[in-house]
Image (cartoon, grey):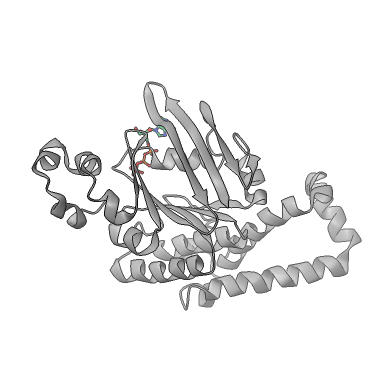
């Protein structure tokens, strides 16, 4: 079943066409990589999908509904969660509270009658339904703890530490845990392995492979080709705002248009295909 359908999506900033006529679909359960040189438009594409930017034209459908231009919070409620290229955590909150925020983003939209009243609704709910609220709180805490344990000994022992005290790699892990707490039908990961060393990247790869095995649909921007090769069913290659190739990782890295985008015309003319695997895409 098609989960995400993107049709001729475009966005420009002044004279720069960051995303031009991008179309693709993503089936439920698929893991697809988005690669491309710096400035290719990958993050802008994610911003358009997650509601952080509005497209100039084109449309996005998610789980059969048109979601073009929806706000990020509404999209999280529908099951579309993301992480950011430079990692965004609430620095002064604990690791656990950061993850709980991900779960509450989901619940706000699962309780439309109360959320219509905004913060007042939450307060009324807390006052009027103490046992139900307590039970829900306990369930959320337990779920958040389980999520932390997915990251081995990295996060669970630090559950009560403020996020600002964590290493960069751990902050990135918290961000992934927070996105997972929303129980997304689609998880968008923007360079999840950026800033991680080789063994940390491998550890992340195992986690993402586990998620994939459990049926999690993922779209990820990643420069580390090894990770993309191990994880992704398909790869979409962008350059200068447009999709220039799509296929399996093995297919796209032999594609002359891809080699030209990364290595320039002379390499493409010489057909230096063998160089591509050594290049960190
Ligand atoms: N808010 C913005 N205002 C102006 N220009 C922008 C904005 N966001 C992106 N751009 C421009 O759009 C183009 C695509 O940028 P984008 O960040 O989407 O590329 P990218 O493929 O994610 O690059 P990288 O791999 O370096 O993260 C770039 O030329 C960038 O400078």
Q: In the image shown, does 52 or 86 lie closer to the viewer?
A: 52
Residue lying at 77% horizontally and 67% vertically, measured from the top left: 136
Hey, which quadrant is residue 198 in on the image? bottom left
Image quadrant assignment for residue 133: bottom right
The image shows residue 41 at horizontal and vertical percentages of 38, 37
**Residue located 80% across and 53% down the image:** 122
The residue most toward the front is 1
Q: Residue 50, relative to residue 11: is it above or below? A: below
Quadrant of the image occupied by residue 18: top left
Vertical relation: 68 (above or below) 197: above
> Who's the residue at 20% across and 44% down the image?
259
Residue at x 54% of width, y 76% of height: 149
- Between 58 and 158, the one lying in front of the other is 58
Q: Give the image quadrant in which the ligand numbered 1 is located.
A: top left
Residue 167 visible somewhere in the drawing? no
State the residue in front, 187 or 133: 187
Give the mark count: 0
């Amino acid at each position: 079943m098609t989960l995400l359908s993107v049709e001729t999506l475009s966005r420009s900033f002044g004279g720069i066409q960051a995303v031009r006529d991008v179309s693709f679909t993503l089936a439920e359960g698929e893991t697809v990589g988005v690669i491309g040189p710096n400035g290719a438009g990958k993050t802008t594409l994610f911003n358009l999908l997650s509601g952080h930017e509005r497209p100039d034209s084109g449309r996005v459908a998610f789980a059969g509904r048109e979601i073009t231009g929806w706000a990020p919070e509404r999209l999280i409620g529908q099951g579309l969660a993301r992480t950011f290229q430079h990692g965004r955590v609430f620095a002064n909150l604990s690791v656990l509270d950061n993850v709980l925020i991900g779960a509450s983003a989901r619940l706000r939209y699962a309780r439309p009658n109360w959320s219509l009243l905004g913060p007042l609704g939450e307060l009324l709910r807390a006052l009027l339904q103490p046992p139900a609220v307590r039970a829900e709180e306990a369930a959320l805490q337990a779920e958040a703890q389980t999520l932390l344990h997915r990251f081995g000994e990295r996060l669970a022992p630090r559950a009560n530490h403020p996020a600002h005290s964590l290493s960069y790699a751990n902050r990135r892990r918290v961000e992934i845990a927070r996105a997972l707490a929303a129980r997304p039908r689609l998880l968008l990961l923007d360079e999840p392995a950026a800033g991680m060393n080789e063994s940390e990247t491998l550890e992340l790869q195992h986690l993402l492979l586990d998620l994939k095995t459990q049926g999690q649909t993922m779209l990820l921007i990643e420069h580390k080709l090894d990770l993309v090769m191990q994880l992704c069913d398909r790869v979409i290659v962008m350059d200068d705002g447009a999709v220039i190739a799509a296929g399996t990782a093995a297919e796209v890295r032999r594609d002359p248009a891809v080699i030209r985008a990364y290595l320039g015309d002379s390499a493409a003319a010489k057909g230096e295909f063998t160089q591509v695997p050594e290049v960190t895409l």
